[in-house]
Image: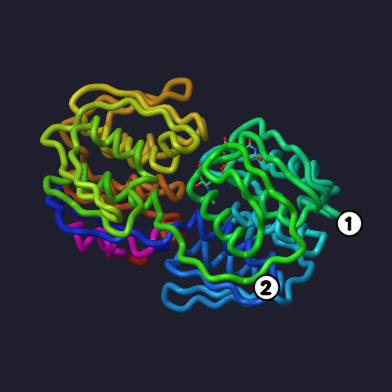
């Protein structure tokens, strides 16, 4: 199992490029199941999660090729086949095949996703919405078995904002007869980019960028070609690396509009910015100010940057709190950061962070994707040497993170332990 050995260095500088957004590409890959013919996705990085999704799509009969940063998916021969536990347990986004399969071939069987390091993550909202469209859903032997002779448009109110449930329902509703209205839909950029892809394919979805979406069912969709949006979480992770550094860092190929609240919070922490159309230069503060953060659905502060922002706050001058309201149990990184001599107390779902002068290198363990990124950032600024084990989590969502960070002065070595 690979691990990172990280030597301390706060003297980073230069520019760093952001790759395509994993969480936008995963649903779009599943959307390719909706039409026969070959769709082409550009700006697709080399990530384990995307390999897992490719594997799953091939099991279902799609032809997937990924060369460089171009991925092609041919959904001509999609057939009924179950999404096995082995894949769904590795990657919960496998649930995204449910909506498209139900819409295209009227039946789908996907393993029920199990537990997850960031807390309980039910799929009840996905299932309720598909049922509202007329699907019959049975849970048998750990599998979700969904069938629908015909999907019929419906009015669906999500009781909670969910990226996954919104996208899955959209993908099922594109072929439903009549009109579907989604209320309290998620507004994340990954939802918008899926809508753009579906509309390019010939779907009729309006309301993009709002919590109310209207889908007019269509009879046919066609393969298309589209550029994938930049990863706002990877960009945010690099901005935080910049905030921890002593020199300016430029994050290239990003979409500043998707990072508004993150930039605001970093400004509150004392950072300054030069913002251009597709790049952000961050000037780090002399002294990191304490900033309180509550994670919320978009456009709020993203839960996927909570752990990384907490690393920045471990070195603030003062005390602040962080609360994750999206995934209230997402604090596995706290104990690991305290091993690096951070001062974080967790009480009833709120982390209170008292800034320390310096973190101190130690051996720590990655528990999930974003927590691993946080530990890498912490290791880059902790005195002496930090070892982060179980970094397979980080390869799920960051393309060659050590190469990218080393190019701006990081001292990260990958070791096969
Ligand atoms: C997606 C992202 C993940 C991110 C999250 C929130 C992907 C592959 N993953 O996950 O990185 O952290 O959005 O921005 O895009 N919920 C229910 N029932 C459901 C579905 C969700 O109660 O059926 C709850 C969840 O437990 C959570 C909240 O709704 O508390 C939001 O989750 P959701 O937006 O669905 O997250 P994912 O789509 O799984």
With 271 as the anchor, is 415 left or right in this view? right
Spatial separation of the CA atoms under disc 2 and disc 1 = 21 Å
Looking at the image, which residue is at 61% across and 76% down? Answer: 38
Location of the C terminus (image quadrant) = bottom left
Q: Position of residue 381 (x, y in %)?
A: 20, 45
Question: Is residue 406 a member of the stretch shown in magenta?
Answer: yes
* Residue 75, label in figure: 2
With 268 as the anchor, is 100 left or right in this view? right
Location of the N terminus (image quadrant) = bottom left
Q: Which residues are magenta?
A: 398-414
Q: Is residue 381 visible?
A: no
Q: Position of residue 388 (x, y in %)?
A: 33, 52
Q: Locate residue 65: give its quadrant.
A: bottom right
Q: Determine the quadrant in which ligand 1 lies.
A: top right
Is the CB–ligand 1 distance for label 1 below 8 Å?
Answer: no
Q: Residues within 10 Å of mark 2 (few under 14, many from 20)?
A: many
**In the rendered image, which residue does mark 1 sit on?**
149
Check disc 2 and report its element: helix, strand or loop.
loop
Q: Position of residue 147 (x, y in %)?
A: 84, 55
Q: Locate residue 83: give its quadrant.
A: bottom right
Looking at the image, which residue is at 47% across and 25% down? Answer: 349
């Amino acid at each position: 199992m690979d691990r990172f050995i990280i030597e301390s260095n706060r003297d980073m500088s230069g520019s760093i490029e952001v790759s395509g957004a994993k969480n936008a590409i995963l649903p779009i890959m599943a959307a390719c199941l909706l039409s026969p013919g070959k769709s082409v996705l550009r700006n697709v990085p080399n990530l384990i999660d995307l390999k897992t999704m490719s594997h799953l799509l091939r099991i279902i009969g799609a032809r997937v090729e990924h060369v460089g940063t171009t991925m092609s998916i041919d959904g001509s021969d999609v057939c009924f086949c179950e999404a096995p536990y082995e894949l769904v347990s590795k990657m919960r986004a496998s649930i995204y095949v449910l909506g498209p399969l139900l819409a295209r071939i009227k039946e789908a069987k996907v393993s029920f996703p199990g537990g997850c390091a960031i807390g309980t993550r039910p799929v009840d909202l996905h299932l309720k919405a598909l049922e509202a469209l007329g699907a019959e859903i049975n849970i048998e032997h750990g599998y979700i078995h969904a069938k629908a002779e015909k999907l019929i448009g419906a009015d669906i109110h999500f009781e909670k904002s969910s990226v996954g449930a919104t996208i899955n329902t959209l993908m099922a509703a594109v072929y439903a007869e009549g009109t579907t209205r989604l209320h309290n839909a998620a507004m994340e950029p990954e939802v918008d980019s899926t809508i753009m892809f579906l509309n390019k394919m010939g779907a009729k979805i309006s309301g993009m960028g709002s919590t109310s979406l209207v889908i007019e069912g269509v009879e046919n969709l066609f393969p298309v070609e589209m550029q994938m949006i930049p990863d706002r979480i990877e960009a945010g992770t690099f901005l935080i690396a910049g905030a921890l550094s002593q020199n300016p860092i430029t994050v290239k190929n990003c979409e500043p509009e998707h990072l508004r609240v993150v930039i605001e919070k970093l400004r509150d922490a004392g950072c300054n910015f030069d913002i251009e159309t597709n790049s952000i230069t961050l000037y780090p503060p002399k002294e990191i100010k304490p900033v309180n953060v509550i994670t919320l659905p978009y456009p709020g502060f993203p839960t996927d940057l909570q752990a990384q922002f907490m690393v920045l706050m471990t070195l603030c001058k003062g005390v602040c709190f962080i609360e994750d309201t999206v995934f209230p149990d997402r604090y596995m990184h706290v104990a690991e950061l305290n091993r690096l001599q951070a001062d974080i107390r967790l009480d009833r779902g709120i982390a209170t962070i008292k800034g320390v002068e310096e973190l101190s290198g130690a051996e720590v363990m990655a528990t999930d994707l974003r927590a691993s990124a946080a530990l890498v950032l912490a290791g880059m600024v902790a005195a002496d040497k930090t070892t982060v084990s179980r970094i397979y989590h980080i390869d799920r969502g960051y393309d060659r993170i050590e190469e990218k960070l080393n190019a701006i002065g990081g001292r990260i070595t990958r070791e096969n332990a």
